[in-house]
Amino acid sequence: MSWVQLAVVLLCVAVGGRLGGVGLGAAGGLGVCVLVLGLGVQPGSPPTSVLLIITAVIAATSVLQGSGGLDLLVRLAEKMLRKYPKAITIVGPFVCSLFVMLVGTAYVAFAVYPVVAEVAASARVRPERAVSASVISAGIGVMASPMSAAMAAMVGIMSTQGIAFWQILAVTVPTFLCATFCAALSVFWRGKELEEDPEFQRRLASGDYQWLAGGDLSKNYEEKKGAKTAVVIFLLGILVSILVGSVPGLRPEWISGDKVTQLPIPSLIQMVMLATAFVIIMVCKVPSDKFASGSVFRSGLIGVVGVFGIAWCTGTFFDSHTQVLSDAFSGIASSAPFLFCVAAFCVSTVIFSPTVSTTIMMPLGLKFGLPPEFLIGTWACCYGDFMIPGGAQIGCTAFDRTGTTRLGTFVINHSYLRPGLVFVVSGTVIGWLISNLVF
């Protein structure tokens, strides 16, 4: 194994991880150039199937946003949050992550975070508790969403191992719900009560903060015509993908000589989600300028570039050293499999993208000889992007006008650290236990 090649890959991952998004993909592209053109490594194949699934899902979700369906879901979330204000620390994470699970993007939750902070303050509940747990749970909610980019990556990878779509969801959904409860419970009694917090008292005394009236933001919302229909069509598309992908008898087969080929699950998801986008456009009469003008399309394509570049770079390196890696780490599958979880978590803290972390680490785990059911069960370890505060954490800290939610002075000593670590640890253990029951 060439240590120079490994150094190139690690440098690209580290620098690209700091840049994020397009910068991550560009750094990966540079790594491929150096490995292939400079060091003579045979290029690996980019994760085409995963990229196409993500693109198809982005198309459907973007059209849903253009139809007003995402805004409708946001308003529904607001109403649910305001219904149980005293229990906002528990209700907030579940409501925020529920809509992420439905549409596969954290965009919906980001629009609801200010409501979580407002409802908590209005109910005299320390907002740090509800905000921190909600941000963590919603951010990791993509692991339980059948339409998220991270799930697309996992389905594409595990379909090569004969794992059905429903089997992945049967593990990840209950794992996510249990881990979300653990994360919320870990901060339920955190810190002083709101009216006893020194920072809040200072802001209250100086006039920087006034008690909120608790107004309902959804009163100013005007529902677009066809928004409900668009949501129903989108959900039907999800159900069709899950049903046909989980029942082999529903997928067509072709015979070529002695070989029988069945429609692959990644191809199924791609065609169904593109068809779903088209049906929403035609039935709900979505204007053409709304197809790709929303934030979902932009952020989704940025993610595609990130996955494309860095996954191609790491895949090129690992493909050229498959046998060496298998020989060196073959014992990990039987002696210390959870060491791989630690490694995956460390990688995810640098990558800042669960989708990219999944695309890199899951194939690597399979090369090490780890069973696919183990990798699915411990998937929560790929969600360590909360360690260094990103956009959601920074933004939600500002949403909490009481000052109880903090980023800290040492980068990682922030309000989101405790619920994040509790989620990852509990999700890894619980998921592993559930996977033993499912498989």
Image (cartoon, helix red, strand yellow):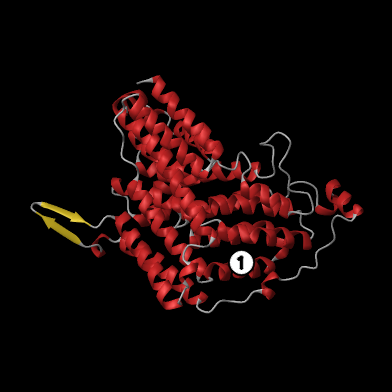
* Viewer can see residue 158: no
Q: Nearer the viewer, residue 255 or 44?
A: 44
Residue 319 falls left or right of residue 96 = left
Q: Nearer the viewer, residue 111 or 189?
A: 111
Residue 33 falls left or right of residue 82 = left
Residue 307: which quarter of the image?
Answer: top left
Q: Secondary structure beneath disc 1?
A: helix
Residue 363: which quarter of the image?
Answer: top left
- Location of residue 17 in the rendering, given as x and y in whole percent from the top left corner: 52, 37
* Viewer can see residue 107: yes
At x 56% / y 42%, what residue is drawn?
A: 385
Residue 237 falls left or right of residue 398 = left
Report the residue that reaches farthest toward the right.
205
At x 85% / y 54%, what residue is drawn?
A: 195
At x 41% / y 47%, what residue is drawn?
A: 435
Report the residue that reaches farthest toward the left.
257
| Disc 1 residue type (three-letter) | Ala
- Location of residue 230 in the rendering, given as x and y in whole percent from the top left corner: 47, 73
Q: Nearer the viewer, residue 185 or 357?
A: 357
Vertical side of 322 occupied by 25: above or below:
below
Vertical side of 74 occupied by 411: above or below:
above
Vertical side of 71 occupied by 191: above or below:
above
- Location of residue 176 in the rendering, given as x and y in whole percent from the top left corner: 51, 52
Q: Using a 10 Å C-alpha cutoff, classify the residue at mark 1 as few (fewer than 14 neighbours), some (14 to 19) or many (20 or more).
A: many
The quadrant of the image that shows the N terminus is: top left
Q: Give the total of numbered labels.
A: 1
Report the residue that reaches farthest toward the bottom.
225
- Location of residue 156 in the rendering, given as x and y in whole percent from the top left corner: 35, 49
Residue underneath mark 1: 77
Residue 286 falls left or right of residue 365 = right
